[in-house]
Amino acid sequence: MNYISIAANEPASAAAAELYARTDTSGIALAPQPSHAATQTPTNAVIETILSRSAAKYYDPTAALSDDQIRDLVRIGTSAPTSFHLQNWRFIAVRTPETKARLLPIAWNQPAITDAAVTFIIIGRLADASTVPERLAPVVEAGIMPAHLVPEWEIPARRLYDDQPQRQRDEAVRTATFGTAAIIYAARSLGLGSTPMIGFDAEAVHSEFGLAEDEVPVMLLTVGPERAGNWPQKPRLPVADVLDFA
């Protein structure tokens, strides 16, 4: 499934990776940064994918992704967790020049909309506990869950979400965000850049792309092969500043 080798976009060796981390987009060496080894961070292919991801600003405007490649990304994204297995998400893959032109003016005219191979409109659906039996039916058929447990999921879901519009919307945003994160890291593992974006007119997107009343356009996600000029991952706050033990 490696559509584009990561080696085409990132240094292949540890030494090259260290040099890349110490170089800005013009090739000027920067101050040394601590390596993963120095901080004793455990590592494997998944962790390296996460730690090397950065937001892509510059995409190759001549590149494209096939329908199957786009389906693969969404299939992986929908493996993310959802409350009560609601799977309350939907994805619109904006990929043709005509559809990009519709999205561009309501997405702040950001160049990535037209340059990236695809821009996903990430949609969260308001949590609806009445869908729990339907969502769990394949789980029962697969022999994962006994049928008698279905009401034990539906009843607490109804207590949580029925007549609770804020909770329903919160769950829509949570679900969409989990799915987006999975697509982001899947894209990175396949050598593709990505950027989640909140710079858009939500009401206009809702209208222009025919979203239902129970659907929330949570974010946009551009995905595609990158071109030169993107930064490596920016330093984060120290763990000591964001972690408390209780």
Image (cartoon, grey):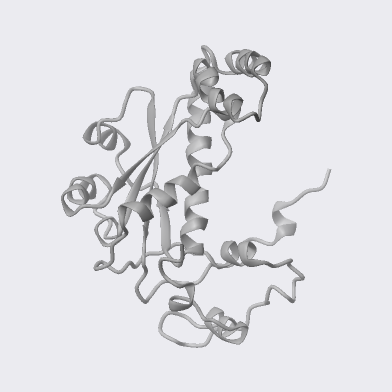
State the image coordinates of residue 123 (x, y, percent, origin top left).
39, 36
Residue at the location (48% across, 55% down)? 184
Q: Is residue 60 above or below residue 173?
A: below
Q: Residue at x 24, y 53 (%)?
A: 109
| Residue drawn at the location 34% of the way across and 73% of the way down | 227
| On-image quarter of the C terminus | top right
Query: Closer to the camera, 201 or 39?
Result: 39
Q: Is residue 28 above or below residue 184?
A: below
Residue 64 image point, x, y percent? 28, 62
Q: Is residue 152 left or right of residue 75?
A: right
Horizontal and vertical percent for residue 88? Answer: 47, 30
Number of disc labels: 0
Above or below for 201 versus 84: below
On the image, the x and y values in percent for residue 186 come to: 50, 56
Quarter-wise, where is residue 27 in the image? bottom left
Given the current orientation, which residue lies at the most extreme left position?
98
